[in-house]
Amino acid sequence: MGPVVHKIVQCLFSARGRSCLFGLLLVAVTIFAYRPALHGGFIWDDDDYVINNGLLTAPDGLRRIWFSLDSPSQYFPLVYTTFRIEYALWGLNPSGYHWVNLLLHVANALLVWRLLVRLKVPGAWLAGAIFALHPVQVESVAWITERKNVLMGFFFLLTLLAWIAFVDERTKRPWRFYGLALILYLLALSAKTTACTLPAALFLILWLQKKPISWKRVFQIVPFLVLGIAMGLLAMWWERYHQGTSRAIFTFLSPIERVLVASRAVWFYLSKLIWPSNLTFIYPRWDIAPTHLLDYTWLLAGMVLCVAIYFLRRYLGRSVEVATLCFVATLSPVLGFIMLYTFRYTFVADHYQYLACIGPIALASAALINLADAFERSRTLILSAVLCVVAVLAALTWRQAAMYGDIETLWRTTLARNPDCWMAHNNLGIVLFQKGEINEAIANYRTTLQMQPDFWDADYNLGSALLQKGKVDEAIAYCNRAVASEPNDPDAQVALGNALVQKERIDEAIVHYQRAVAIRPDYFIARYSLGHALLKKGEIDAAISHCRAALLIQPKNPDAHTTLAVALDERGQTAEAITHYKNALQISPRSISAANNLAWLLATSSTASLRNGDKALELARQANQLSGGANPLVLGTLAAAYAETRQFERAIEIAQAASQLAKMQGESALVVRLQQETELYEMSLPYREAPK
């Protein structure tokens, strides 16, 4: 045993063994630090990316992800491909999506470590650890939608490693690595277009390694540059003309204002790296004006820093300028020179600097390790302090990850740190509305509109909440305002349609549902609502068509199955109607309408082969229990089921009770129908539906 133990100890303390131990430690600590977010749910636009994304379930979804304009956001085909695979594996369980994000982030931290080792940067492991555990990264990891960030980062870093291998004179057959780098770069761009900044990193790697930047190298970088520019232009077109970002968003900042925003943003991101306090999901939006002299402070400070770096480069080497240029270049697409939709409510976000932070982190790590090496007597003290800093960052990440534990916590925390965030008020209102806390939801919507009167999302959200409270006329007024402000918003069209249905203005409601479907053909709620409205109007064939389309988008929606079944029964296609009622009950066993309607068909169908009295009685009892015995329609179905099983005395008793209940509720038409059915039961005859 002695020699074996000795070999194991030798292996552990070898360079490779230490690397494995440090790597495992980094993985374990990172996973532990993000534990509070692993059981979090979906937040904000996770609905568009995952929950309501028909591309994840449609038979032709994969083709449309890559080769159509059907994406619910920008062109992120690789991201949606991963979501489609995961949807097939674990459906809408958010834990799986969180784990994939976290594992990609862990892989990125290991790649940062490896990249800096290849570049011979001191403190490579420390930089990887800080990258993994810095709390500014939490937004990119804990927010499922930001899969595009961690996935892009993975292929971005692999591209840099392939490029380093290509330019290394010791590499055999280097062109294999060049081809690999191009492929990896295409994958990075297909995850997120901000990877277009990679050509700058290729130049900086050559500069840092003191390799000549010849025309040969320039021509080798040109294909990367062309791909980046092409994807950047596509993203700008998509954002402006396809995604629906209005022209006003792009023109509300003058060129000098954009420069002022950019200069302040650079210092903002750097400050959050140095002192990560008060991190929040949405930061306050700055008021920038060329007439305010203080707004030029950040620009002036940046100029001073550039001059200082230039004159100190002979003492500091190229590392400081490379880190600075890497930081600014990687941030450049989100600094304000290109207008983004998010600039309506904030100019900055933590996830914007996911990769950009590598430069300053690597510089700081190298400086700390060099400091420890320079002061050998204090080396242990310095390294202990560094490890304490890493531990503090891990603790801050744990705390920040808890913010993403559930969506209500996210918005309440955001408001605690940014009380004037009208977007957070609106989104908290949505959460409260879904919880049934309608009054508090209305209060948040009204606060949103006080802060941002032209925010149409709050208009139709308030309209929907008022509709729940029975204030139909006021609901219609707010929904009309939303549609007038943004006629191309399908949510506003659907909200107005829902309000009009409550006023029995079915024809008008159908028009707005049709507009919503025209804007977004794979929008489930628009398709379903249109089918339901057409059914109420009596246009059965059209109702069936739209309900079938809705089920192609969400095959497991019980309400769509039930509505389609009603329409099919009206058309006389009873057998297929029964199938859809069964599907609805399989998905939602406590559905009163599905159980009641299926029981009615099984008890009263004019086709003997479709009737099943025992099953009808079982379902009718279930529906009656779920409705608390207070629904006269369900009681009528229960009576019919008893009659079908030849229990006529019980059928008469229940039918009479149903009739009395219907009288008390003022449902005169139902009373007449129940009395007619009772007369049949008194003659020992079950009720039969007339053939359709």
Image (cartoon, rainbow, N blue to C red):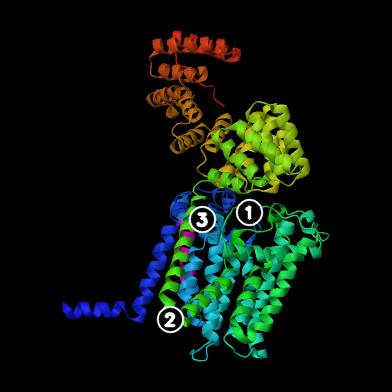
CB-based contact (under 8 Å), mark 3 and mark 1? no
The residue furthest front is 377
Looking at the rendered structure, the secondary structure element under dot 3 is helix
Q: Which residues fall within the magenta stretch?
A: 99-110
Please give left or right for residue 440 compared with residue 400 in the image. Answer: right
Please give left or right for residue 381 compared with residue 461 in the image. Answer: left
Q: Earlier in the sequence, mark 2 or mark 3?
A: 3
> Which amino acid, by three-letter code, is at mark 3?
Ala
Which quadrant is the C terminus positioned in? Answer: top right
Label number found at residue 72:
1
Name the residue tied to disc 2. 376
Q: Residue at x 75, y 45 (%)?
A: 486
Name the residue tied to disc 3. 142
Nearer mark to the viewer, of 3 and 1: 3
Can residue 495 be seen in this snapshot? no
CB-based contact (under 8 Å), mark 1 and mark 2? no
Displayed quadrant of residue 589: top left
